[in-house]
Image (tube, helix red, strand yellow):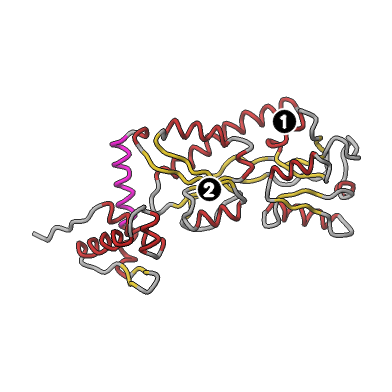
Amino acid sequence: MGAVISFNIKQLDTFLWVATLGSFRKAAERLNTTQPAVSARIASLENALGVQLFERMSNTVRLTAMGQQLLPLAQRTLRTADKLQRAANTLATVNGVLRLGVAETIVHTWLSDFLREFDKSYPLVDVDLVVDGTLALRSDLLSHRLDIAVLMGPVSEYRIENVNVPSFPLIWVCAPHLDLPETRVSLRELLRFPVISYARATRPYSELYHKLSADADDAPRTFPANSLAASLRMTMDGIGIAVLPLDVVRDHIARGELRKIDCEWQPSDLQFTASFFLEPVNPIAEHAAQLVAEVAEAYAAKHHLRTAETA
């Protein structure tokens, strides 16, 4: 009879986090434990398997050839263990923290709906919320400071799963007192005013700037802003015209604080994804991403249908 190999799920989980982060210290911070505890788990796992999993260097570690071979097996084992755990426990008993990052557009639309639904599924899980631009959210996600990010995606990284979220149509708006006709206008006519837009390092800004540059004799005057609230305020104050999500400005138009501009050219819709790491396994983040898609679909069906009916 062969020797019995004995190791536990906690050791495998630690193995995955050290491999992902390349550091015992960073893995200890992520697992809310100490560096000696992480070192002890890895040493016990290596003893149980009879192989060396990591090459230790001054500030980092890297997988050995055997460690690279065993990593996919460890990932599959943890997924199987997670399925067993979820079958044994109801969602209501799961606890922990979900580190959620969202773009500001989401705050102004369906975020509250999502938080209510998430609380029903995971009443013992706290949500740490970060609101930021897409570039910052992507960076925080890839560095494992976030469990899930709802951003202008997708995130082109093989370890990341991107769940599509219904898009947001963009429209031209201005302050009611601005000297623009109620009839359809050309881009050249709009360029009499500064254009308030999304931040420079975004797809909406790039598309808008290249289109405006092609239709203008001189470089268009733009006010790129990474704050949706700031863009709204500047537009309502008549600083310039703006391209903003219909879902965000709808109520301002209804109250007479903004006016929709009928322009010959409309920018592309904002495309969002709920993005999270496939490995190490994070079932709460995976379920949260699916819930994001469901809540966003319900929001889009309700509000975009209402817009069509009243247009």
Q: Secondary structure at mark 2?
A: strand
Q: Residue at x 51, y 54 (%)?
A: 141
Q: Nearer the viewer, residue 124 or 82?
A: 124
Residue under circle 1?
Answer: 251
Categorize mark 2 by other alpha carbons within 10 Å: few (<14), some (14-19), many (20+).
many
**Residue 129 relative to residue 37: left or right:** right
Residue 49 in the image: state x and y as whole percent: 21, 63
Residue 67 in the image: state x and y as whole percent: 31, 66
Q: Amino acid at mark 1?
A: Asp
**Residue 21 relative to residue 302: left or right:** left
Residue 124, picture quadrant: top left
Residue 171 in the image: state x and y as whole percent: 75, 40
Q: Secondary structure at mark 1?
A: helix
Q: Which residues are magenta?
A: 74-89
* Quadrant location of the N terminus in the rendered image: bottom left
Categorize mark 1 by other alpha carbons within 10 Å: few (<14), some (14-19), many (20+).
few
